[in-house]
């Protein structure tokens, strides 16, 4: 018996933010992603078998929310920062999916290409047939202190 129920839904989220300090920029990015009033709990990168995607979720304020995520911040004005996550889903819904995360001081297309390749590789290592890959990411040009966040939130319905 597990201590926590296994999540059965997931949602891809992303956000960018600016602040006077790096932590404030990260907080702004979480608010922009729609999860700023939760306690995200960083987890490793598995989508439970049969989990369904939701375009948005209502999460409890202050709740402990399992999330696989990428984030990066910078205080170098003009610097481009990007974060992305990829969710690889299997043909056989009784098998687990995989989440990959990547962030870099690079344009979004570079980060998305890399995270997509990571998801494909993860399925190849598992010898699983891939049904589809879903990717979300965000790019931001830093003004003062900037941050980006991309995540796969898991929850229960």
Image (cartoon, rainbow, N blue to C red):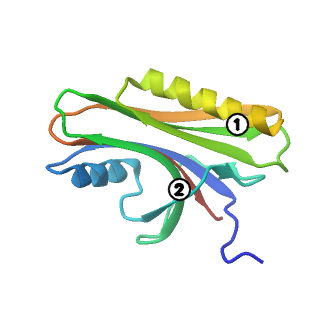
Q: Nearer the viewer, residue 122 or 135?
A: 122
Screen quadrant of the C terminus: bottom right
Please tell me the numbered disc located at residue 52: none
From the viewer's perspective, is residue 7 above or below residue 82? below
- Residue at the spot 62% in from the left edge and 32% down from the top edge: 118
Residue 90: image x %, image y %? 78, 39
- Residue at the spot 56% in from the left edge and 49% down from the top edge: 11
From the viewer's perspective, is residue 54 above or below residue 104? below
Callout 1: few (<14), some (14-19), or many (20+) C-alpha neighbours within 10 Å?
A: some
Residue 121: image x %, image y %? 69, 31
Question: Mark 1: which secondary structure?
Answer: helix
Where residue 133 sits, quadrant-wise, is: top right
Callout 2: few (<14), some (14-19), or many (20+) C-alpha neighbours within 10 Å?
A: many
Q: Is residue 157 left or right of residue 153?
A: right
- Residue at the spot 73% in from the left edge and 75% down from the top edge: 2
For marks 1 and 2, the one nearer the N-term is 2
Residue under label 2, please give it. Answer: 67
Q: Is residue 148 visible?
A: no
C-alpha gap between disc 1 and disc 2: 18 Å
Screen quadrant of the N terminus: bottom right
Residue under label 1, please give it. Answer: 122
């Amino acid at each position: 018996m597990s201590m926590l129920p296994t999540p059965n839904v997931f949602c891809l989220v992303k956000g960018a933010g600016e602040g006077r300090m790096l932590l404030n920029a990260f907080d702004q990015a979480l608010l922009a992603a729609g999860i700023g009033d939760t306690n995200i709990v960083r987890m490793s990168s598995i989508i439970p078998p049969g989990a369904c995607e939701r375009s948005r979720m209502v999460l409890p304020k202050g709740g402990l929310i399992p999330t696989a995520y990428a984030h990066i911040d910078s205080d170098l004005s003009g610097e481009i920062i990007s974060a992305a996550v990829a969710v690889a889903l299997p043909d056989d819904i009784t098998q687990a999916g995989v989440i990959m995360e990547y962030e870099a001081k690079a344009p979004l297309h570079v980060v998305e290409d890399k995270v997509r390749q990571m998801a494909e590789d993860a399925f190849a290592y598992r010898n699983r047939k891939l049904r589809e890959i879903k990717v979300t990411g965000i790019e931001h040009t830093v003004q003062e202190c900037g941050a980006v966040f991309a995540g796969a939130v898991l929850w229960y319905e």
